[in-house]
Every structure is written in C-alpha cells, then in structure tokens.
Image: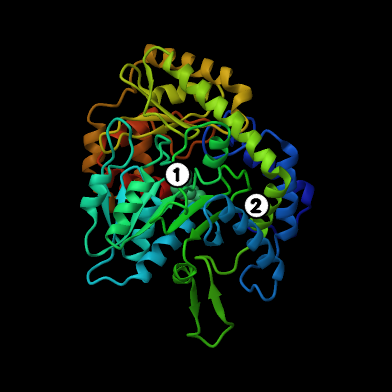
Amino acid sequence: MSLPEKGRDIEELLAEISRLKQDDLPVRGGKVTAYVYDTGRPEVHEAAARAYFEMLEVNTLDPTAFPSVVEMERQVVGAVAELLGGGSGIFTSGGTESIMLAVKAARDARPVGGRPRMAVPVTAHPAFHKAAHYLGVAVDAVPVDPVTFRASVAAVEEAITEDTVLVVASAPSYPQGVVDPVAEIAEAASARGVLCHVDACVGGWLLPWLREAGARVPPFDLSVPGVTSLSCDLHKFGYSPKGASVVLFADPALRRKAYFASASWPGYTVINATVQSSKSAGPLGGAWATFQALGRDGYLELGRATLAAARRLREGIAGIPGLRVLGDPESALVAFGSDEVDVFVLSDEARKRGWFLQPQLSYAGIPANIHITVTGVTLRGVEAMLEVIAESAEAARERGPAALPEGLVDLVAGLDLDALDDAAFGELAAAVGVDLGGSGQPEMAVVNAVLDALPADRREAVLIRFLSVIYA
Ligand SMILES: Cc1ncc(COP(=O)(O)O)c(C=O)c1O
C-alpha cells in the first residue's frame, strides 16, 4: 500500500476491510476450533466491542491521568483473584506477557550465583521459552508421563538446581488439555525454596466453572501451598476481546518485582506494570464489559455447555475407526491422534469441509495429533463436528499420507538458510509445490509433514524464514 494522496471515506474503508478479510477463518460459529472463543451470545461480544471502543483512546501509560484505568483494572483483577485463590495482580495483553512478567519477577526476586534457570515441562507453552530467551534465563526441560501427558514430579525435583528461580506447572497444558500435578510440583518447589508459577492461561477462567458444572478438577490455583504466581487469560475462556490476561502474585512484594520504573532520562516519569508502555485501555474495557455482561450465571452456563460438548466430543472421537483421544483431559481441550491415518491430511480434509482443526507436530515422544478447543458455542454443532471428523478421517485414509517429494526433508534439513535470501526461499518452496504467497485455504499437509520430520531447532529456523517470506 502506498499512503493515499487524500483521505478516504469511512464506508469505502470498511468495504476494503471486508474484502481483506474474505479469506479469514470465521471468528464466530464454532467451526474454527482454535484461536477464537465464541460464547454463542452476540450481545455479549457487542457489549465488549462497545466498551473496547469507549476506552480505545485512553492510554494506560499514566494511571494518574486516567483514573478509570485503575478502577477498571482493580475490578477485573479483583474478580480473577477472588475466583483463583487471592493475590495481587496485573492486567496484561495476553498469556505471553503474563508469563514474561512472572518470569521477570522470579528472576529478580532471588538473585542466584549462576545464570538463573527454570524447570519447565515439555508440554508448557513456548511463552516460557520466549520469556527465558528475552530475560536471559535458561530452561531445564522436564519430561511428562507418556500416557497421561502430565509433568513428572520426580523429574521436576531432579531438574531443580541451586540456580533455579522458577518451577512451572500448567493447568492445563495446551497440547493435550491435562492438568499437571500442581500441588505436588508446588510442594517440591517450596521444599527447595523455589517459586512456582501455574500457567492457567487456558484453565484459570475455565476450570472453576467446569468444576462447578460437575467435572473433576484438582486444586490448581493460588490457594495451593507453594504456588506463588498464576497466569489467567481473559481473551481465552473469559471470552473477552484479544489483549486481555491477568497475572496474579501470592505476595505483593513479588508483584513489585514484575514492575519497571526508569528515571534515567530527562523526559516524563516512566513507571510500567507491563512490558508495553503506552497502550490502549480498549482491551481492559472489553474484559470489564464481558465480565459484567456474562456474570457468574453466564460463565457457569457456558461451563456446563462446554463440559457437555467436550465429553460428547471425546466419546464420539473414540468411536471413529482409527482415531484415539490422547490422555484423559480435565479441561475442554481435546487432542486426538491416529496410527492409521495422516492427521495432517485429515486436517486439510476438514478445512475443505469448512472446519479448522488445528494440527500439532510430534514432539518429545508425543505423536502428531489434532487439537480442538471446545468453547461455549461448540455444543450446538458438536454432532456436525463429529461427522466432519469421521468423513475427513475416511478421506485421509483413502488419500494416504502426505506425499513428500523424494529428498525434500533431507534438502530442508541440510539447507544453509543464511545463504538464501527470502526470494530464493520462496522459489524453493514453490518448486516443491508450497505457495507461500498464496491466499485462500492452503493445503498444509506437506508443510506439516516436512516440519514434523525435522528436529525442533530446524523447525524454528524454517518457521522464522517462512514468516519473513510471507511478510516480504
Ligand atoms: C497454556 C497456555 N499458556 C500461554 C499461552 C500464551 O497465550 P497468548 O497467546 O495469549 O500469549 C497459551 C496460548 O495458547 C496457552 O495455551
């Protein structure tokens, strides 16, 4: 785009946005089983959108200039603390930022002799690796049980060293939706004087409602002895617009370690609770309004529908020949794998039928699989979803595994990426049938199969190049 010479009319702009969005996956309706969270109640999303818009131009940079921000944040964070065992918190832009702040607080709370380290189960979200990377902390990977996919407590204990500043448990971990043994992990950490963060980005605003609706959910929040911080995303099962999460700290002194102030310049006073400095209060307004529009009853009702849908989905998938549900998730995330059909082809087949089912690559002994996030709206379409999964599995069986051009994996594995510019990488991808500049509904099975065959560090290098090419 070049900047237009003269300003354009709003109607024209909105028409253009609609055109730009025409190949996007739909954010409502439940056919996209990752990334988006739909209550199935348009009036709730409208309330959030209007409140977001109302707060859009308010800058949270200076709470003394905009006291509305302090009051709204107190209310939202207070509601989260009330549900999740207390503590003092910070409203952040998402799970990654909440985790980043928890890692920063842990790093700064107890200086260690060597490089600070954290013990992180292999199923924990990459936000911990990102935080580690940004904050100069080393990660010690903790294996999970190969059948339950829950972090091994014995392995956590083994991973703790004298430089460990943080131990992590997930409630639940995203890949299979299972809750780690939080109480045991927190106890092991506290016995060694180490802080323990529970990543409840997915489960914080879900598990309590599922529990109330009848699910068996083990204790996982700040009321568990030894848990010192917890992240809970509101833009997931809080159903708020994106940009909304809360990180809670058991101790206000630990929260202060997440803050940042700088007086090392001659400009305005800088005091930040989050990574972002200037930021819109829109997401805070959206989260506040979603809480108010749904209320306890609304969340409980959504929890009941979500639980019923997740149970039906697990049972239905188990009845489809060749498919099996991985683990026994307490949450509303369901992953299934197969020894008989290529799950990447299955995912492409579902996409042709109008459904997005998220593929997950194999890792740390866990096979490639398909991930479904069940939300409040899923129940209405769960039978249709099961039919599509069954049909797509059958089609994938007929098609057979993704056909990889001979030698492609070895070629990619051995590529000297530093010697290739983005254009050459794009041409190489096109030569093997992968159009990185294409739009619409891409066939991803080949790409996923290649990535799946590579070790993690090569996957990362290729993914970074992929991003660079699509934004070229
Ligand atoms: C368990 C868990 N933690 C953290 C995150 C990161 O959240 P965000 O994408 O909001 O940064 C996710 C995202 O899916 C998640 O599932």
Total marks drawn? 2
The residue indicated by pointer 2 is 287
Q: Nearer the viewer, residue 76 or 193?
A: 193
Label 2 Cα neighbours within 10 Å, binned few <14 / some 14-19 / many ≥20: many
Colouring convention used in this rendered image of the protein = rainbow
The residue indicated by pointer 1 is 219
N-term-proximal mark, 1 vs 2 = 1
Please state the horizontal and vertical placement of residue 260, each as a whole percent of the image. Answer: 48, 74
| Nearer mark to the viewer, of 1 and 2 | 1
Question: Three-letter amino acid code at disc 1?
Answer: Pro
Q: Quadrant of residue 57?
A: bottom right
Question: Three-letter amino acid code at disc 2?
Answer: Ala
The residue under the point 54% across, 88% down is 266
Q: Quadrant of residue 179?
A: top left
Q: In the visual, does 49 lie left or right of 108?
A: right
Determine the secondary structure under disc 1. loop
Q: Quadrant of residue 21?
A: top right
| Visible residue check, residue 470 | no
The residue under the point 37% across, 42% down is 180
Q: In the visual, does 23 lie left or right of 130?
A: right
Please state the horizontal and vertical placement of residue 70, each as a whole percent of the image. Answer: 66, 67
Please state the horizontal and vertical placement of residue 288, each as a whole percent of the image. Answer: 68, 54
Label 1 Cα neighbours within 10 Å, binned few <14 / some 14-19 / many ≥20: some
